Amino acid sequence: MKEGMLCKLTNEKASFENTCIDFKEDTAVKVVSHQTEGLEISQVREKLSEEDLEYVKSQENLIPAVICGLIVGLIGAILWGTITVLTEFQIGYMAVAIGAGVGFTIRLIGKGISQIFGIWGGAIAFVSVFVGNIFSIFGLVANAQDLTLLETALYFDYAYLPELLSETFSPMDLLFYGIAIYEGYKFSFRVLTQEELEKIRAENAAE
């Protein structure tokens, strides 16, 4: 209590500044740390037997995941339109946030490792970003014409929509769209660690 933190090897205060010649790396700590790292889906498939893989797939929830992903995507699109109205500026970074939100939602609800989860995640992310882009245009038109968003959606001449989309389009939008789709796909898969795989094997064996 009087000396403060002491070295376990010397029972004295540390006498070194940057490195200690007596330090020995604990390899056991590295193993534990490695076990907590998420594995790629391809790694999961390699490490699990067909029986264990089927057990993991039995825990998948595709329909609830798709529904929740659609809800999150719609909320993100509405937020994008709202922020655009408030700032009078279309923020492309919102597309990235929407893609991530959709992907993580599908991962959380779906617990899926099948390819279909990534496909749905990427597709929903794309549709959500596209709808958010349209909502942004509606918001700007509503502001200019002093209308509500609902009135704008009802009375809008949709023949002009492609022209407005092209006018508000920039090459950077392709990048944001691409990132959103990638995130929607990539983040939709369940993340498993080596430790969790071992638990799955034990659970499946017990059943």
Image (cartoon, grey):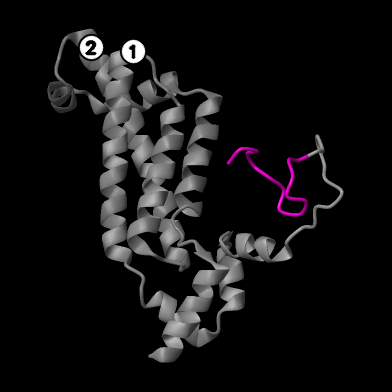
Residue 64 at least partly seen: yes
Q: Identify the amino acid type marked 1.
A: Glu
Q: Residue 48, relative to residue 39: is it above or below?
A: below
> Which amino acid, mark 2?
Asn
Query: Which quadrant of the figure contains the N terminus?
Result: top right
Q: Residue at x 36, y 43 (%)?
A: 127
Report the magenta residues as a range.
1-14
In terms of depth relative to the viewer, which is nearer, 199 or 107? 199
| Cβ atoms at labels 1 and 2 below 8 Å apart | yes
What crowding class fits label 2: few (fewer than 14 Cα within 10 Å), some (14-19), or many (20 or more)?
Answer: some
Could you give the CA–CA distance between mark 1 and mark 2, rounded to whole angstroms?
A: 9 Å
* 30 left or right of 117 in image: right
Q: Residue at x 52, y 47 (%)?
A: 182
- Is 49 drawn above or below residue 151 in the view shown? below
Residue sitting at x 33%, y 32%: 132
> Who's the residue at 26% across and 55% down the image?
67
Left or right: where 189 falls relative to 5: left
Percent x, y of residue 61: 32, 67
Residue to which mark 2 is pinned:
143
Which numbered marker is on residue 201?
none
Magenta segment, prevailing SS (helix, strand or loop): loop
Question: Which of the two discs, 1 and 2, sits closer to the camera?
Answer: 1
Q: Which mark is residue 88?
A: 1
| Residue 13 highlighted magenta (yes or no) | yes
Instruction: Specify the farthest residue to the front.
Output: 2
Q: Earlier in the sequence, mark 1 or mark 2?
A: 1
